Amino acid sequence: MGGEPLVALDLVDTLMLAADPPADLLDNDRAAECWWSLQGRRLPEGPAPDPGSTRRLRAAIRDLLDSHLENRAPRETSVEDVNAAAAAVPVSERLVGRGGELHQVTRWHDEHGGNVRLAAIAREVIALMSAPERLARLRRCANPECSMLFLAENSRRQWCTPNICGNRARVARHYQRHRIPGGTAGNAAPNQEGR
């Protein structure tokens, strides 16, 4: 978790839908605080949003991404929720002088409400959904016991993480190839020394 190029993908992956019942990794204040802290370097500065607003945006984003993967229309409320979160905090570009040079910075206008972090995440989703070539890289993990979404860097990537779900698949394939009919893998005869 935390390795996707978009914070929005990491946010939707905090709800593990493949578990029964689904597991919410943001279900308590401490876990949510930790998650927002980990994402802090990737988001504009600002307070962590309230849990209800976070869950609402997460559900809307998940519906948008799932609708693309399932080739269906998203719920209208999902589109409205993402747009509302993005619009709640307008931005403006500014020039700032530092050391004799001018730099562009983004100013988030949260004086009248809204949450900067949710607005930034909603803007990521808007950019993704409106970029067909990038959206074509959106995948759901090939492990049926995983519900994580990711952007594939290449067409061969099929696992959320190669060292977890990918490794499990490789181990399962290895087990199937080396399984002894009528027995189990790993029941090889002892060597000559009885070991």
Image (cartoon, rainbow, N blue to C red):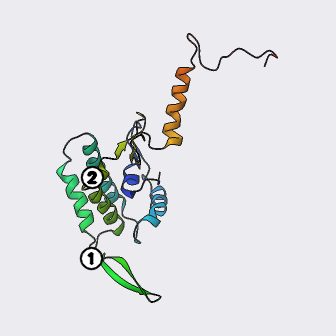
- The amino acid on which the numbered mark 1 sits, given as a three-letter code, is His
Dot in front, 2 or 1: 2
Kindly identify which residue carries mark 2: 60
Q: Name the quadrant containing residue 125.
A: bottom left
- The amino acid on which the numbered mark 2 sits, given as a three-letter code, is Ala
Residue 89 at x, y = what percent?
28, 71
Identify the residue at the far bottom of this view: 100
Identify the residue at the far top of this view: 182
For residue 135, say whether it is visible: yes
Q: Earlier in the sequence, mark 2 or mark 1?
A: 2
Position of residue 192 in the picture relative to residue 19 (left or right): right
Query: In which quadrant will I find the C terminus?
Result: top right
- Residue at the spot x=19%, y=53% of the render? 77
For residue 59, say whether it is visible: no
- The crowd level at tag 2 (other Cα within 10 Å; few <14, some 14-19, many 20+) is many
Residue 60 position (above or below residue 36) = above
Residue 155 position (above or below residue 185) = below
Residue 25 at x, y = what percent?
44, 50
Position of residue 98 in the picture relative to residue 167 (left or right): left
Q: Secondary structure at mark 2?
A: helix
Kindly identify which residue carries mark 1: 112
Relative depth, front residue between 35 and 6: 6
Position of residue 34 in the picture relative to residue 128 (left or right): right
Relative depth, front residue between 168 and 50: 168
Relative depth, front residue between 27 and 95: 95
Relative depth, front residue between 14 and 31: 14
- Residue at the spot x=32%, y=60% of the render? 124
User: How far apart are the alpha carbons under marks 2 and 1?
Assistant: 23 Å
Which numbered disc covers residue 49?
Answer: none
Q: Secondary structure at mark 1?
A: loop
Residue 146 position (above or below residue 2) = above
Residue 82 at x, y = what percent?
25, 58
